[in-house]
Amino acid sequence: MLDGVGANLEQYMTLLADRQKLVAANIANADTPGFKTKDIDFQTEFTNALQGIQPNVMEVQGLVVKNDGNNVSLDREARLLAENALRFNIASNLLRGQIHTLRLAIEGGGGSSS
Amino acid sequence: MSLFNSLDVSASGMAAQRTRAEVLVENLANADTTRTPEGGPYRRKDVVFESSATSSPFSSVFQSAIDGQATGVQVSQIVTDSSAPVMRYMPGHPDADKDGFVAMPRVNPAEDMVDLMGASRGYGANVAAMSAIKDMIQRSIDLFR
């Protein structure tokens, strides 16, 4: 029913949720010796997700490695946490608009939708 | 659902940091303890963090590529310091040896306080992550309205 934009938005939100999980894992392991920051290349993975390909998780290069072999940067993760939440916010608002339109059609445009 | 697993990841981080804080507080409290059940002065303890798979009741059923990669954290062991105690000259102390030296714990309160701040900040970061994820779940639920 929610084809086109709606389906793409769903993929987008799923991918954002997956990325948020990686960010949460990075933050949880901020003090684990030897842990390497993990992330996905969002643009590439989103294009892949639209074709049904599972996301590919990779280790982030170019971060400062601490003495214990851990390279989690809390600033980077905090930024991504906020960014993902905002993107999810936008996507959920857009999807709500789509659902609202669909509901208007179901209810015959009577305007009684809540 | 993936977002609920993310909550498990953050919760594991909070639990690990809390354990770390507990051990650090124990070190601080026992900085001058000269008698222990094992005999001798108190020996400082340190936690070792290890990344681990989070335990969610559904994780084994719905294991996606990301679920396999995203890991929580756990305290793998608590290490007791085995280095020699500090010998302090306190002739009047009941635990002093024949030369008047008392074996005191090798605890540096400044070091532990700084570590405690790190544990507190780490806990806070996990709380922030959990709150952001909770917000995302709430927004998904709001789609039904």
Image: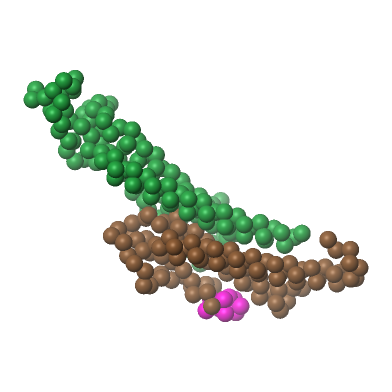
Chain colours: A brown, B green
Q: In which quarter of the image is residue B86?
A: top left
Q: Is B104 part of what is drawn in magenta?
A: no
- Residue A3 shows in this picture: yes
- In percent of width and height, residue B128 lies at 52, 54
Q: Quick check: B60 above or below B31?
A: below
Residue B130 lies, in percent from the top left, at 54, 54
Left or right of residue B34: residue B60: right
- In the displayed structure, would residue B36 be above or below residue B18? above
Q: Is residue A91 above or below residue B43?
A: below
**What is the chief secondary structure element of the magenta stretch?**
helix
Reply above or below: B14 against B105: below
> Where the C terminus of chain A falls, by quadrant?
bottom right
Residue at 89 percent of width and 63 percent of height: A112
Residue depicted at 34% across the width and 43% down the height:
B113
- Number of marks in the rendered image: 0
The residue at the point 36 percent across, 72 percent down is A62
- In the foreground, B9 or A104: A104
The stretch in magenta equals A44-52
Relative horizontal placement of residue B103, taking residue A104 as reference (left or right) = left
Quadrant showing the N terminus of chain A: bottom right
| Residue A45 counted in the magenta span | yes
Q: Which residue is drawn at 67% across and 61% down?
A: B140
- Specify whether residue B47 is in view: no
- The one nearer the camera, B59 or A39, is A39
Q: Residue A76: image x %, image y %? A: 45, 65
Give the image location of residue A111, x and y in percent.
Answer: 89, 67
Question: In this view, which residue lies farthest toward the left?
Answer: B99
